[in-house]
Amino acid sequence: MEQLIQIVDTTLRDGSHAVRHSFTEEQVSAIAAGLDRCHVPLIELSHGDGLGGSSYTYGFSKRDEFLLLKAAAEQIKNGKLTVLLLPGIGTIEDLKKAHDCGAKAVRVATHVTEADVSAQHIEAARRLGMMTVGFLMMTHMAEPEIIAEEAKKMESYGADYINLADSAGFLLPEDVAARVRAVKEAVSIPVGFHAHNNLNLAIANSLAAVEAGASYIDATLRGLGAGAGNTQIEVLAGVLKRKGIDTGLDFYGLMDLAERSVEPLMQRPQTVDNGSLMLGYAGVYSSFLLHVYDAAKKYDLDPRDIMIELGKRRMVGGQEDMILSVAYQLKQQAG
């Protein structure tokens, strides 16, 4: 059957949030090798907040990300080792170093209305000969027609496809479909989608994206990722197989890899607990979750109250340093 959907695995990038950026070379090697054996075409690895993300603000990595990239590159024979880069966090020099370590693709991520800051990084990646993706985050914060205009900018800079991220896990299936259709109509390159499961809709939203014309779908083993996690790759492989959509993935192999190599590393189950649910409900960036828990403990607050306030203030990725400030203000208001 014709292969219609390309699956991008982000276990070793978005999943980094869920394990507090503690992946080791041995773990990365095992997971990357397994994903490659299962025919995953794009395998993303970096700090959860992209190249250069290891910091006080975003959380320090246990191991240098370039060492992890080299370890993964040694194992990937067929797929493309992929990195995430957020302009303002990662630099073009970081990108060049990642390329030297074996990265073949990069996804350049910006806030949904700030595509213009990606131009230099996308152009630099193209000069390096890398597959280059324009990645628009927090797409619930803009209407479809606005997102389409931002996507056109990334296409003009040289992106090979546009990825739309529901970074807060806030969107409903009809919202996803509207955004994918709008971008599909606006650009001549493929469209992808990245879901978070904070409202327990990651699989449903991924299917809505496919039905609206998306060609690339992000997923992770066991759903490992920020907040309640991402679309679970082994489940997605089974669901798409049931629908007669061939992804080329090894369904059984992914199940075995998730059970043997990822489940033992998980620091908590990827369930829709109260905190994750509130992320989705309030429209808060999924990687804020552990930072919010830390702030709530520090100031003896209900983490749900912090998330509601973050949502009201329309906080976006890159503002993690403001979480403690918001928590402090809430504590002062409470007397």
Image (cartoon, rainbow, N blue to C red):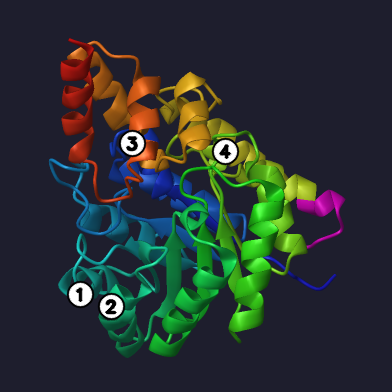
116 relative to 93 in the view: left or right? right
Magenta region: 240-250
Badge 3 element: helix
Q: Which residue is mark 1?
A: 92
Within 10 angstroms of label 2, few (less than 14), some, or many (20 or more) residues?
Answer: many
Q: Which residue is mark 4?
A: 197
Residue 289 at x, y = what percent?
Answer: 36, 31
Closer to viewer: mark 4 or mark 3: 3
In this rendering, the answer to whether 295 lies above or below 172 is: above
Badge 1 element: helix
Q: Is residue 212 visible?
A: yes
Residue 25 at x, y = what percent?
Answer: 30, 46
Q: Which amino acid type is shown beneath numbered disc 4?
A: Asn
38 relative to 57 in the view: left or right? right
Closer to viewer: mark 2 or mark 3: 3
Residue 96 at x, y = what percent?
Answer: 22, 75
Within 10 angstroms of label 4, few (less than 14), some, or many (20 or more) residues?
Answer: many
Within 10 angstroms of label 1, few (less than 14), some, or many (20 or more) residues?
Answer: some
Comes first in the chain, label 1 or label 2: 1
In this rendering, the answer to whether 179 lies above or below 57 is: below
Badge 4 element: loop
How far is mark 4 from mark 1, CA to CA?
A: 31 Å
Q: Which amino acid type is shown beneath numbered disc 3?
A: Leu
Residue 5 at x, y = what percent?
Answer: 69, 66
| Image-quadrant location for residue 154 | bottom left
Q: Which residue is mark 3?
A: 310
How far is mark 2 from mark 3, CA to CA?
A: 29 Å
Comes first in the chain, label 2 or label 3: 2
